Image (cartoon, rainbow, N blue to C red):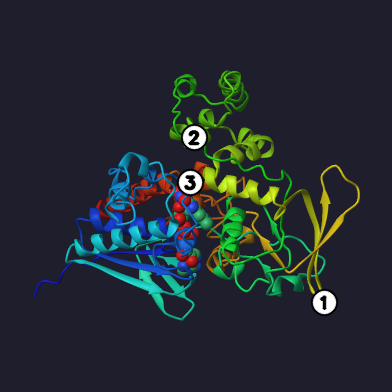
Amino acid sequence: MSSSPKPLEVAIIGAGFSGMMTAVQLIRKTTVPLSLYLINDKYEFGKGPAYSTTHPRHILNVPAAKMAAYPDQPNHFLDWAHQQDAYKEMDKEVLGKVFLPRRDYGRYLVEVWAEVLAAKRPDTAVQIIQDKAVDITTAEGQNKIELASGQTITADYVILATGNEPPRNLPVSDPALYDDPNYIGDPWNNKAVENLDPDRDILIIGNGLTMVDIVIGIMDTGYRGVIHTLSPDGLAILPHRYGYISYSKLVEEVKAPYKLNDLYALINKHIKVFKKSGLSPEPVIDSLRPITQKIWQGLSLEDKQRFMKYLMPHWNKIRHRMPGHMYDYLMQRQIAGGMVVHRGRLLNMTQTSGGLSAEILETNTDTPIKLDVSRIINCIGPNTYVSQSLNPLLQRLVSKGMLHADPLRIGMQVTDHWTLVGADGQEIPSLYTIGGNLRGLLWETTAVPELRGQAEKLAGEILSKATNV
Ligand SMILES: Cc1cc2nc3c(=O)[nH]c(=O)nc-3n(C[C@H](O)[C@H](O)[C@H](O)COP(=O)(O)OP(=O)(O)OC[C@H]3O[C@@H](n4cnc5c(N)ncnc54)[C@H](O)[C@@H]3O)c2cc1C
């Protein structure tokens, strides 16, 4: 009797967009029997914190025409959206420029998954496991994954697609504050805006896109209090306003080898031309996107460190913009007094008999102010330093020396083909990662336009490695 060959076993830990789309690409591309394990906790399969929201006004920050799940089918999402009842009547070109609700994108991903499963080879097996991975042991080419439930999974290859981590906690005099139900450390938890006292003020720490989500989430609840927000730059977030401009002159002039000073001078030259015409620099910076990763990889570590110290806030301000109508809403809310933006830094947060209190030092002042609020929501952005991760799996891998931070502490130390490098400097060839965990290597590795290409590349890399041994 002939026995069938052992299938290639791949386990993906985390099934947000990156994990799910890597699975999709493995299923589409495999030419050998394949067993896939998708281990995911906390969020609905495929959606992660970004697309799990059910709020109709939580919208994509990338226009529909750029949100296809497949790199080789650029209109895939737009075509899907145009077939939906809600958007059928719309001019397709206009629809492509619209920032659609993220919950619609979540529905699209559900359909992408269903379609791929329906067309899979009979010798491809897929198992979705709703559980938390807590440890990985690697020995003799096999990986054993331990789950919180006690179950174990073995696999030839493991992909860490663990995605966005909640923000790090800010230092306070009494850490008991972190257990207070009105201190929200994870702003993507739907509970962040539930059961708010409609007449009492709240404080949001951070002034980025997550803050915008929180404000939007509150807006339909009959809330009458004041929303205070705090960050060193105040409300620096910009609206999308130059969708009609596509600029190519800068990229034509950018040449390797890349040096930060030269790039800075060159970019400034182009920005000055824009400013002369009354335009701000966003299209100039956006035009670098196709080569941003290449430039980043060509910079010296010293230049990367200088970029992060001096230029990163300006870069982030230009790159992470919000849809224009959301911007208008925030402006109106400020004018009406329903939102107060504080420029400064947090000194402390304490529990009081009536709620929470925050001590703030506003920029250019010497005397701290106190804000008494019913809730404080931490929106300072995802924690990227793996040594301070709250994810038990990453904590365990760090403690075993299988995982450590890249030199900039913004992602994981990896090889150029995305396998982990342990604390001893040795590659772990069967352990891969994708998405935000590659930030140290790639810098811009957050949004769908980058992640869909990564999913395809990673699936191809694993399949060619597995079938060439
Ligand atoms: C609120 C928000 C809005 C966004 N909006 C957009 C947008 O409009 N357009 C865009 O292009 N990008 C957007 N992004 C960027 C977003 O990061 C990517 O689009 C994408 O969703 C990231 O997917 P991911 O799979 O890498 O990570 P995540 O979506 O974070 O998924 C990771 C998954 O892994 C699970 N996980 C982690 N550790 C374990 C473990 N130990 N065991 C089991 N499971 C685990 C998590 O619970 C989660 O389900 C947004 C991000 C956020 C946070």
| Cα–Cα gap, marks 1 and 3 | 44 Å
| Cα–Cα gap, marks 1 and 2 | 50 Å
Tag 1: amino acid: Ser
Circles 1 and 3: CB atoms closer than 8 Å: no
**Disc 2 Cβ-to-ligand 1 distance below 8 Å:** no
Q: Secondary structure at mark 1?
A: loop
In the depicted view, which residue is nearer to us: 113 or 406? 113
Where residue 169 appears, as percent x and y from the top left, is 69, 62
Q: Which mark is residue 445?
A: 3
Tag 3: amino acid: Thr
Is residue 181 shown left or right of residue 171? left
Where residue 167 appears, as percent x and y from the top left, is 63, 59
Q: Residue furthest left?
A: 1
Q: Which residue is mark 2?
A: 292
Q: Secondary structure at mark 2?
A: helix
Where residue 112 appears, as percent x and y from the top left, is 29, 58
Give the mark nearest the N terminus, 1 or 2: 2
Q: Secondary structure at mark 3?
A: loop
Q: Which residue is mark 1?
A: 353
